[in-house]
Image (cartoon, rainbow, N blue to C red):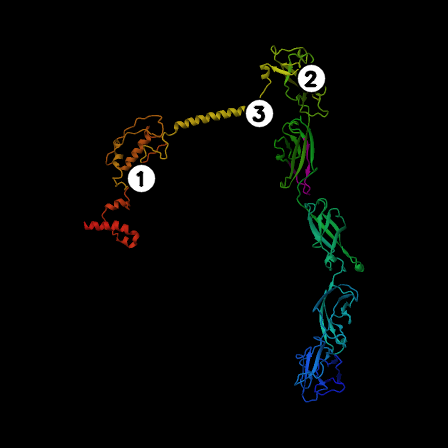
Amino acid sequence: MEGYKLFRKDMKGKQRDGVALYVTEKLECMEFCLGMEEEAIESLRLHSDQDKGDGSLKYILSGDGAGTLFIIDEKTGDIHATRRIDREEKAFYTLRAQAINRRTLRPVEPESEFVIKIHDINDNEPTFPEEIYTASVPEMSVVGTSVVQVTATDADDPSYGNSARIIYSILQGQPYFSVEPETGIIRTALPNMNRENREQYQVVIQAKDMGGQMGGLSGTTTVNITLTDVNDNPPRFPQSTIHLRVPESSPVGTAIGSVKATDADTGKNAEVEYRIIDGDGTDMFDIVTQKDTQEGIITVRKPLDYETRRLYTLKVEAENTHVDPRFYYLGPFKDTTIVKISVDDVDEPPIFSRSSYLFEVHEDIELGTIIGTVMARDPDSASSPIRFSLDRHTDLDRIFNIHSGNGSIYTSKPLDREISQWHNLSVIASEINNPKDTTRVPVYVRILDVNDNAPQFAVFYDTFVCENARAGQLIQTISAVDKDDPLGGQKFFFSLAAVNPNFTVQDNEDNTARILTRRNGFSRHEISTYLLPVVISDNDYPIQSSTGTLTIRVCACDSRGNMQSCNAEALLLPAGLSTGALVAILLCIIILLVIVVLFAALKRQRKKEPLILSKEDIRDNIVSYNDEGGGEEDTQAFDIGTLRNPAAIEDKKLRRDIIPETLFVPRRTPSAPDNTDVRDFINQRLKEHDTDPSAPPYDSLATYAYEGNDSIAESLSSLESGTTEGDQNYDYLREWGPRFNKLAEMYGGGESDKDTS
């Protein structure tokens, strides 16, 4: 049967016996295994039955890796690998081979496919996914407690030999931990490992293939193991006795010191609760647990007194709040200590016998009567004398006073319950030896009522009686009020001061009374007004009474008793203007007065108004000059002779801007000689105007000015410069450019003309 033969050759190229495989046309593929990867790759030879050895055939190889990884000798059919083959990259290759005629390029046999399967060798060591592992386990764990599992992987074929069979072992970390060889689980190996002794452990684990046999490859990893805390340590006070001191003046709630028990555990396992369990100061002090510092803060529960007790002893207990039942055998998880607290003496202010005082006194007591006494003492052992005083801010009217030595409070002014029923005083007690130490106490004084006020009409009564009234007719109901406040309530009695033939009073016995007529008919033309005295008395002791007078007007009424009109006199007597009406009348009067004043002021202003109203205020005695002038030497601008000769001045004219009130005859002044100095002349004229009664009024302006002596800089006037003959040359103006040509012609040309003339 025709076909291909596939030979396996050794490294020397010799054909090995018993390895020749026959590949028929019907066989689609066949497998052939190469040797181990670590050895030199052996070559294969493909041989066709049609090959006569004359070189007429050509072998062709195609498929996975053909031409790159595998090449074939066209003449001999030898197949070679170009590089080292790695099973982990590709486990098998599928190739196709064919023999063709070299000249015709026609296949002499059909194409045949075969598979090259790569056998695995142990060329990969085990690897861990993490280079360093972190794990933890509670302290005091029993032996065999699982900590963590580490797993290594091997890239070799697990189905072929022991190349991928991994065994774990511990290289570092004994005797504290162990590892299971097959699973890689790390477990504790020692009992009662204590975190307080050692917290961190480093364990090195090795993974080795080939089942851990000699020659196997290995890899390692590091596991950092931390022992976590458990509550296996009770709290402990560092001292069996603790001493604290506190001033006796410390207020309630003051922190006087702290205690702290140490616990070797951490976190919640070290949390401690403090309490006072015994001692003679359990009712005087409290203890509070400070969570952030785990301290017990001792505070004052009640006020302290050095003179009463100077030393307290407390038994304080500290106990864990989270106790693990597994470690009860290590307990108890609490500890106690003795705290001794010494009270220091402080110079305390005086103490009153009461927190407040209440005194009651009748309002009719005599001046200087003692209403009560306050008492205070020095709580210190020195027992300094006490001085008492009143805070005058609480007794601005100085109604009371106090004896500074014994604290007796007495009156210094009369009392009146109707003005003030309560007086709230503040008494100050201070030590004589140390006046800065003071204490205050409130003293409440209640003024008791005495019947010292007579009753009066409750309101003002506007009473009238009709002319057609009949006897026994009710014309008014009256009532009374009393400032006093008797314990049994108010009770008033009403009566007439004298028998009245016209009217009578009927007491209703309910603190009201009725005014009734005693006869028929009244005439307002005969008597327009009646005055009726009514006596009002109370029933308290001593009885107080007063007489109130009712004004009864006689008025004309209709048949129903409604008032229609009263005479003028009767209307004027009781009638009165209301407050609103009076205010309105006053406002009207004020407005009228303001209008009159404004009218008079406007009229006066009109008299003073100037006759000439213009933008320029023209006054005869002001002379304005707009030219600069050339000084005193410039006689053309102003004739100084006019000033020297007053006769040349026109007669004084009356001012045209205001209406003259009084006319004065102008006074002639003597002329000054020509040689008089201008300064002397001006001073003379000023003196004349000051003494002249006909001089202009205060709002006129008379201006005299004196320029002074000649200036050393001479005149700056350009007008004078034109008349002086100088040798100044203005030719430089032509050098300044065309803008100054005009000036150059004006000045330079003038010189030229002058020279030519």
Q: Marks 1/2: CA distance?
A: 100 Å
Residue at the (59%, 16%) spot, across then down? 571
- Give the left or right position of residue 712, taking residue 118 as reference: left
Disc 2 residue crowd, few under 14, some 14–19, many 20+, Cα 10 Å: some
Q: Position of residue 307 (x, y in %)?
A: 71, 44
- Give the left or right position of residue 529, taking residue 756 as reference: right
As helix, strand or loop, the secondary structure at mark 3 comes to: helix
Q: Position of residue 141 (x, y in %)?
A: 78, 64
Q: Position of residue 653 (x, y in %)?
A: 30, 29
Occupied quadrant, residue 178 = bottom right
Stretch in magenta? 371-388
Q: Earlier in the sequence, mark 1 or mark 3?
A: 3
Report the amino acid beneath label 3.
Gly
Say which mark, if any, is on residue 534: none
Q: Which-is-in-front pick, marks 2 and 3?
A: 3
Q: Which residue is mark 1?
A: 626
As helix, strand or loop, the secondary structure at mark 1 comes to: loop
Q: Which-is-in-front pick, marks 1 and 2?
A: 1
Task: State the residue lying farthest toward the left.
Answer: 757
Contact (CB < 8 A) between labels 1 and 3? no
Q: Marks 2/3: CA distance?
A: 33 Å
Is 691 included in the stretch rendered in magenta?
no
Q: Nearer the viewer, residue 573 or 95?
A: 95
Q: Which residue is mark 2?
A: 514
Q: Position of residue 289 (x, y in %)?
A: 72, 52
Q: Which residue is mark 3?
A: 580
